[in-house]
């Protein structure tokens, strides 16, 4: 961001942080149930790159349809981000792991243990167990069942409760991009490992993710991996099953 864009973004973040449903003074004359997210954003004159970052990386919207919908959901998501950011004295709620991405699952298991959670490792063929009414009651593996009041899982564990999903995205809407190096203990000194993830728009994702001409000759090796993305076909309140797509 340039200097002036930083100032505009800061004003927007302050508006989001101060917004309260029951305090009209914090609304700045906007009824977020009627005006669209696009109209709110335009009031602060934010640039397209900033809007993409805020909408997809912070508010976690999967496409740009939120821009033409009532702004209340968008601002509420942004407010949750601002509150989580303010609650971390280190300055950021994000985890950036050393020794590879396995550290993310390890940090989750340790944090879970602090609040009384139990981690069961290397459990094959896990299946969700349901009662007679169709509500989830636990997870079963090799004859053992861990009972619970709610199951949160990847949609692939529930083949009868999901459907294949493919949406059209603009080419610049990349879901994830990051890089690791020797400093993170995952690559030789002087080398970098970059990750780029997006939804495939064609049947040739290798062509879509081909490095630009400014990188040709500098890339040692490229690995491609494609997989289907699914979304749930169930309602969480009906069977006590929640997946990441529902939470988003």
Image (spheres, helix red, strand yellow):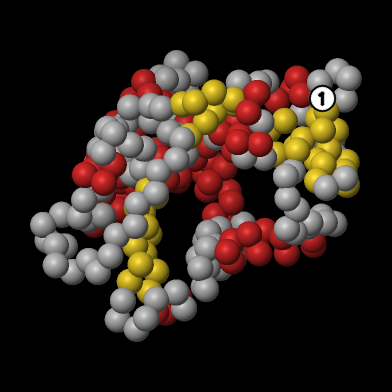
Q: Name the residue carrying label 1.
A: 135
Side of 145 where 182 appears, left or right = left
Classify residue 134 as left or right of residue 235: right
**Residue 213, how many percent across, how many down?**
11, 57
Residue 224 is situated, as x and y percent measured from the top left of the image, at 35, 52
Residue in the picture at 36% in, 43% down: 198
In the rendered view of the protein, which quadrant contains the C terminus? top right
Of all residues, the one furthest to the left in this rendering is 213
Q: Vertical placement of 178 versus 136: above or below?
A: below
Between residues 158 and 184, which one lies in front from this camera angle? 158
Quadrant in the rendering for residue 182: bottom left
Position of 194 with respect to 59 (left or right) is: left
Q: Can you give x and y, in whole percent of width and height, for residue 172 in the image? A: 26, 41
Q: Can residue 29 be seen in this view?
A: no
Q: Decide which of 188, 13 is in the foreground and name it.
A: 188
Give the image location of residue 203, x and y in percent: 29, 34
> For the point 26% across and 55% down, which residue is it?
1
- Number of labelled discs? 1
Q: Residue furthest bottom?
A: 189
Residue situated in front as seen by the camera: 83 or 103 = 103
User: Around disc 1, counting alpha carbons within 10 Å, would you say few (fewer than 14), some (14 to 19), or many (20 or more)?
Assistant: some
Whether residue 52 is situated above or below residue 84 in the rendered picture: above
Q: Is residue 98 visible?
A: yes
Q: Does residue 13 lie above or below 200 as drawn?
A: below
Residue drawn 73% across and 64% down? Answer: 110
Instruction: Say which element carries label 1.
Output: loop
Q: In this view, does 163 lie above or below 53?
A: above
The residue lying at 59 percent from left, 51 percent from top is 84
């Amino acid at each position: 961001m340039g200097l002036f864009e930083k100032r505009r973004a800061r004003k927007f973040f302050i508006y989001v942080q101060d917004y309260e449903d029951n305090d009209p003074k914090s609304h700045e004359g906007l009824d977020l149930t009627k005006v669209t997210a696009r109209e709110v954003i335009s009031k602060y004159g934010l640039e397209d790159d900033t809007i993409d970052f805020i909408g997809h990386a912070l508010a976690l919207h999967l496409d740009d349809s939120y821009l033409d919908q009532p702004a209340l959901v968008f601002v509420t998501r942004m407010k949750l981000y601002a509150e989580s950011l303010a609650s971390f004295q280190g300055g950021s709620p994000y985890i950036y792991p050393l020794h590879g991405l396995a550290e993310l699952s390890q940090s989750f298991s340790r944090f879970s243990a602090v609040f009384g959670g139990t981690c069961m490792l290397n459990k094959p063929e896990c299946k969700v167990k349901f009662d007679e009414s169709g509500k989830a009651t636990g997870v079963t593996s090799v004859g053992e069942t861990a009972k619970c009041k709610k199951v949160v899982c990847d949609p692939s564990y529930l083949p009868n409760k999901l459907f294949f999903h493919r949406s059209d995205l603009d080419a610049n809407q990349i879901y994830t991009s990051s890089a690791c190096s020797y400093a993170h203990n995952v690559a030789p000194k002087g080398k970098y490992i970059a990750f780029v993830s997006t939804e495939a728009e064609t049947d040739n994702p290798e062509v879509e993710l081909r490095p630009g001409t400014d990188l040709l000759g500098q890339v040692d090796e490229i690995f491609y991996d494609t997989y289907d993305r699914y979304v749930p076909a169930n309602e969480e309140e009906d069977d006590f099953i929640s997946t990441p797509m529902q939470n988003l």
